[in-house]
Image: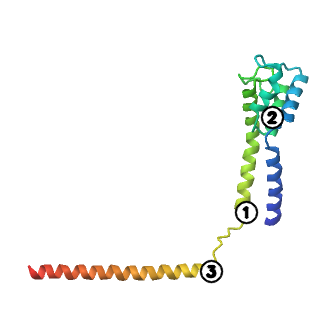
Amino acid sequence: MPAQARLSTLSREITALTERLAPASEAAVLRSLDAMQTAGMTMPQGIEPKKILAVYHYALSGVPACGLAAATQKLIRGDYAANANVLLGTIPKPPVLAALAKAEAQSMRAELARKRETIAALKPRDTGRSEASRARVRARLEAFRRTHAAAKAAAQNVSALATREIHHAA
């Protein structure tokens, strides 16, 4: 695949992944809780019924919607049976659900990072320096080296003369 087409495809894939990794909306949180209740899971104890949506939305703010959807599906299927923080048949408490959702989104975040690195590697390196600019820098460097070498030689000559005078005077 030509590099330009590959860059275009990667850009589209990055856009799609970025959209999927967008934070879960209040509607997504409500859908998740509703799906788990419909599956027969019960709400955890200790949260006032009127505040359930607000508490879950707060805990899940910034959590990717795709992670929440994946965690919800796995909870309903019982895929977290080995997790000590998850009680089967009960909707996890807000911080536990947030942790599960973040963990589910981690692979997608890693994929997004890989695609961004691939794009960076495929893009040509543009140093932004013209050949004329490089020539000016080379000329200045050469002039500096000549001046420095001359100053160093003069200092050595002065030092040698001073040493001779000291030895001659003694």
Mark 2 crowdedness (10 Å alpha carbons): few <14, some 14-19, many ≥20: many
Q: CA distance from mark 1 to mark 3?
A: 23 Å
The answer to whether residue 2 is seen in the rendering is no
Distance of label 2 from label 1 (alpha carbons): 33 Å
Q: Are marks 1 and 3 in contact (CB under 8 Å)?
A: no
Query: Which of the two discs, 1 and 3, labels the residue nearer the N terminus?
Result: 1
Task: Please tell me which residue is depicted at 36% across the width and 83% down the height of the picture.
Answer: 150
Q: Which residue is mark 1?
A: 122
Residue 125 in picture, x, y percent from top left: 68, 68
Quadrant location, the C terminus:
bottom left
Pointer 3 residue:
131
Mark closer to the observer (1, 3)? 3
Classify mark 3: residues with Cα within 10 Å, few (<14), some (14-19) or many (20+).
Answer: few
Q: Quadrant of the N terminus?
A: bottom right
Mark 3 residue type: Glu
Q: x, y (%) of residue 23? A: 79, 40
SS state under label 1: helix
Please identify the residue farthest to the front as the structure is shown. Answer: 50
The residue pinned by badge 2 equals 68
Q: In the rendered structure, are the residues bearing label 2 and label 3 in contact, judged by CB atoms less than 8 Å apart? A: no
Q: Quadrant of residue 73?
A: top right
Q: Amino acid at mark 1?
A: Leu
Q: Are marks 2 and 1 in contact (CB under 8 Å)?
A: no
Tag 2: residue type?
Answer: Leu
Q: Secondary structure at mark 3?
A: helix
- Say which label, 2 or 1, has the lower sequence index: 2
Which callout, 2 or 1, points to the residue nearer the camera? 2
Element assignment for label 2: helix
Instruction: Identify the residue at image location x=72%, y=28%.
Output: 95
Q: Please, is residue 24 above or below residue 136 in the view?
A: above
